[in-house]
Amino acid sequence: MAARQNDQAEIKQKVTCKRETFEDLMDVYQLLLEAYGPRHWWPAETPFEMMVGAILTQNTTWVNVEKAIRNMGKRLTSDYIAAAPLEELGELIRSSGYFRQKAQRLKNLTEWYAQYTYDIEKARARKGEALRAELLAIKGIGPETADSILLYALDKLFFVIDAYTRRILERLGYTLPQTYDELRMVIEQNILADLTVYQEFHALLVEHAKRHCTKEPRCCACPVEGICWYRQGKVT
Ligand code: SF4
């Protein structure tokens, strides 16, 4: 009986034991950077191609996005997307899945971009918060897609949160706020306010989630195992 109570106390401790602050987040960044090197994400030839990629990557893998982008070829321009019949555009991006929905979303995005006469510098001249509000008002663009566009195409300091971010930070032992924006802000408050750091940190977390911190984590030789509370058995 006493042994069982001890076991339960230990389990409870494992679940409730959490890091108290996010102050050492930059240490995580440095370790990942040393292990994987700069990722130079997002792979796109133009800021508009980046924005298109941010829509195409919703609910699919990057391999499927690449196929769709290749298929669009020289038609990957704002002029083409604005004028193309919806069905024709959908066929071009079929490999990315939900292609009818995404074709409409690309048109919505392009319509928004038209107010800046498809000139990225004009869009960049706007304040980040104003741009974010505009992007979030577009049907089919949620916080993750909006922040990806803000960070990688519009050069604005908004940290991108995805499922990988939550998985890794939770395993490292951080207490994560529930909502997207709360987590974004707590990360932003604890890392260097620098565009390269924001871009690289997000990309490094994605890389880490694919190489080591997979669904079933491959902890052996993980670059952050020395500071990982899951590895140390403090969290489950
Ligand atoms: S040690 Fe394991 S759980 Fe911790 S970050 Fe690395 S892969 Fe993930």
Image (cartoon, grey):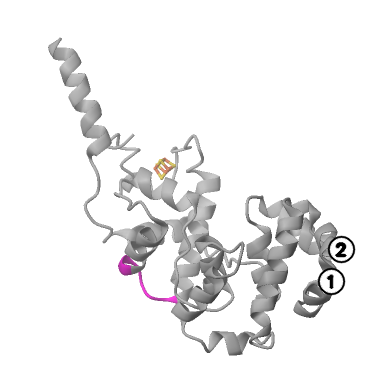
Q: Where residue 84 is drawn, which disc sits there?
A: 1
Indicate left or right for 205 with 183 as reference.
right
Q: Quadrant of the N terminus?
A: top left
Q: Amino acid at mark 1?
A: Ala
Residue 49 at what x, y percent from top left? 70, 72
- The residue located at (35%, 38%) in the rendering is 231
Compared to 214, does 52 lie above or below? below
Indicate left or right for 24 with 31 as reference.
left
Looking at this rendering, what residue extends furthest in the left direction? 2
Residue 45 at what x, y percent from top left? 71, 74
Compared to 157, does 178 lie above or below? above
Q: Which residues are magenta?
A: 189-194
Asked which secondary structure carries label 1, the reply is: loop
- The residue located at (50%, 63%) in the rendering is 143
Taking the magenta stretch, the answer to whether it contains residue 190 is yes
- The residue located at (48%, 73%) in the rendering is 196
Q: Based on the displayed image, in which of its 4 quarters is residue 230 positioned?
A: top left
- The residue located at (54%, 53%) in the rendering is 207
